[in-house]
Amino acid sequence: ELATSIEEQKSTYFASDSSVLLRIKLTRRCKTSLFPHLDVATLHIAPSDSFVLLTNNKRRLNIDMNPTLEGSEMASSSSSTPRSGSSMNSAPNGVAAAAAPYLNGLASSFSRLRVMDNPPPEDPRVEDVEKIAATEMNQLSMQSREQILYDLHGISETILDETPEFLQTSLTQLQDAIHQLPDGDKEAYNLAMTMDYKYVTNSNFRLKFLRSDMFHPTKAAVRFTKHFQAKLELFDQKLLCKDITQDDLDDGALKCLYSGWIQELPIRDISGRLVSVLFQQVLDQELTVEDKLRSVWYRRMTNADEIETQRYGIVFIIFDSARAWDRVTTWKIGRLLSGLPVRFMAYHMCFQPEYYQQIGPIVALGRMAVDTFDRHRFRVHTGSPLELKYALQTFGIPVSSLPIDEQGVVSTEFNREFWMKQRVEENRKASETKDEGEEDNITSNRVTTPGKHDVLMGRGRSCQEHAGNVRFRYLIEQNLDRYDLTPKHKKMTIALEILNEIHAKGGRFLSPSDTGWSEIDEVTAREKVSSCFRSFRKVKGAGKTPTSALNRSSGTVRKSSA
């Protein structure tokens, strides 16, 4: 009814939501009734939704794809008024009936991850992907569109109130959703249940997946079962019910991990989100796809150990130079992410202008490999390294912590030190004897990346500019006069007020440790606050700016000699 043929097979590609895009040659009837003077159009097929026919003049034709409905109609919508006689009432039944078996098979092929044996399709055209994204965006509510913009710019806090009752109800709903999934979609999950029931049903473990999908039980159930399928493909079966550590990685995956190919910044962005940056130029091209996938698996599961990351999500940045990309890795990492308990709130693609012309189709391929939630959160920036940093700064990214200079030279020192500390922590945990059935063996209490409300007891510009330290300095300065006028025996009360205000926001006072950061006790923290007041008084008496003076003291709160 619509097409005489597929114009180009290479324009066909599959997305993670089981969609397909076809460039079709229109039938004479379709052209006469709907699109005169148009021979070719783009057909977007989504089995969970409908056909959407897109044309170069931005007209859209929505086609009901539910074959169970009798007498369904094809509705035409466009920027202009549709021509009379364009309903083609007889077409949808034939289209739906003919396409349903194909679409069901397509959906079935994507029910499991199959990370290792699922090769990428041909690269889609950038303009086609933009059309798909625009169509999907138009179907969202105004509130959803605004939320995407807020997430991109780091000005939203999509955090739910996690009461014990809410968490327990969510866990019950997750289990119910898992039971409702087809057995064919959870073979690896069922295997894991027989191997180690306690590991699979661990509450902290399952909450990671619920948080990654904003407590949507069905989505979290699909992610949870895909997780075990992907893990079974990437690692030995004996590791299916075990947290992967660096000792479980082979040499290639470890080399990839320590190379600095992907690095996490030492501080979070303005919204408290973890910032992860990819530098393609430092990656050893001899590493295999399997090495990269196992490295990404271990990295993201380590990221998900922190409650802060589970709740606020991750911002992903590609900061690249003219270096050939591996399209197979791009596709398979996008597929892998749908089985990991992480939520990406924004993607920033940063390239040199001339290079993006070459890499654009592969970026489009990666964009279609992720799910719909992620697809609308892509932004492309072009320019020099300095210009790209300025662009990222407008999105709340702490650009001063980016390990790349104005000449494009990447530093990997912090990344190597970070993973060495992580290995020390893993060895320490492995040496400890844990009580049988203990539930805190999944989520670590170690702080690897401080939250936005935390106050850091460290030196360096990154500590000075950390959001928690900036707010702490503001609180000290605002209460300085009151502190000076208060009798000595009551000064500790003011220090306690500030300490409580930091804690009320979920903040902590953190000091550097051998494995990252550790929280200091309340007595020590209270003394640190009092010490900071004394330091402020000294610099104020010297006629200096208190905030500037505290900046020069590395943004830390140190015991005064006074």
Image (cartoon, grey):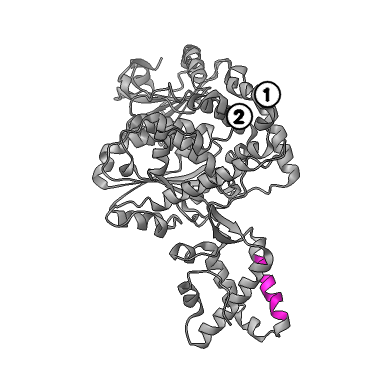
Q: Is residue 328 above or below residue 322?
A: above
Label 2 element class = loop
Picture disc at residue 179:
1
Q: Is residue 107 left or right of residue 160?
A: left
> Is residue 81 visible from the viewing direction of this image?
no
Q: In this picture, which residue range is highlighted in magenta? A: 490-501
Label 1 element class = helix
- Residue 43 image point, x, y percent: 40, 24
- Give, as a three-letter code, the residue at label 1: His
Quadrant containing the C terminus is bottom right
Label 2 CA crowd tier, 10 Å (few <14, some 14–19, many 20+) = many
- Give, as a three-letter code, the residue at label 2: Cys
Q: Residue at x 66, y 66 (%)?
A: 501
Q: Residue at x 57, y 25 (%)?
A: 238
Q: Is residue 229 above or below residue 286?
A: above
> Is residue 40 visible from the viewing direction of this image?
yes
Q: Residue at x 48, y 39 (%)?
A: 374
Residue 309 inside the magenta-drawn segment: no
